[in-house]
Image (cartoon, grey):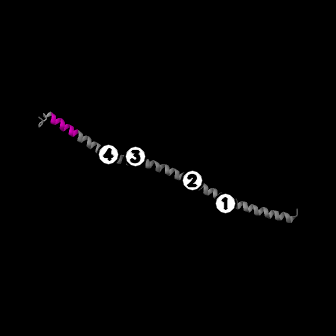
């Protein structure tokens, strides 16, 4: 092998090394971007879990608020029934005036 052949091969190796360095730099940058993306996804998942807990608490509060009118109506109906029963009992206790 002559010096000229060695010089050509050396030049080819230098070119290949430069190409590999460039590819390695691109791979490292892609890896860093992937790491940043993974970190961002992890943060988003944590925030989503916190939001899910908040939504569950809000759902419980909304359910309680929606149940109030029904409970009020039930309480009102109970009181009306008690009042009617009390009136009938008072009417019967008074000797049922107006009944033969």
Relative horizontal placement of residue 28, taking residue 53 as reference (left or right): right
* Helix, strand or loop status at disc 4: helix
Separation of marks 3 and 1 at Cα, in angstroms: 51 Å
Relative horizontal placement of residue 16, taking residue 40 as reference (left or right): right
Residue at 61 percent of width and 57 percent of height: 33
Badge 3 is on which residue? 60
Instruction: Bin the neighbour count of mark 2 within 10 Å (Cα to Cα): few under 14, some 14-19, many 20 and up.
Output: few
Dot in front, 4 or 3: 4
Separation of marks 4 and 1 at Cα, in angstroms: 65 Å
Residue at 28 percent of width and 45 percent of height: 73
Work out which residue is located at the far bottom of the displayed protein and give it. 4
Badge 4 is on which residue? 70
Dot in front, 4 or 1: 4
Instruction: Give the x, y percent position of residue 65.
Output: 35, 48
Instruction: Bin the neighbour count of mark 3 within 10 Å (Cα to Cα): few under 14, some 14-19, many 20 and up.
Output: few
Work out which residue is located at the far right of the displayed protein and give it. 1
Residue interval drawn in magenta: 82-92
Badge 2 is on which residue? 39
Q: Which mark is residue 26?
A: 1
* Helix, strand or loop status at disc 2: helix
Q: Is residue 88 magenta?
A: yes
Instruction: Give the x, y percent position of residue 69.
Output: 31, 47
Tag 2 near tag 1, CB within 8 Å: no
Q: Main secondary structure of the magenta part?
A: helix
Instruction: Bin the neighbour count of mark 1 within 10 Å (Cα to Cα): few under 14, some 14-19, many 20 and up.
Output: few
């Amino acid at each position: 092998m002559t010096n000229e052949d060695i010089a050509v091969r050396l030049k080819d190796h230098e070119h290949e090394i430069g190409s590999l360095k460039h590819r390695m730099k691109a791979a490292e940058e892609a890896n860093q971007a992937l790491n940043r993306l993974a970190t961002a996804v992890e943060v988003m998942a944590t925030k989503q879990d916190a939001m899910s807990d908040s939504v569950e608490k809000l759902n419980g509060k909304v359910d309680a608020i929606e149940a109030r009118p029904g409970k009020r109506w039930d309480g009102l109906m109970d009181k009306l029934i008690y009042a009617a029963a009390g009136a009938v009992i008072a009417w019967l206790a008074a000797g049922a005036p107006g009944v033969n």
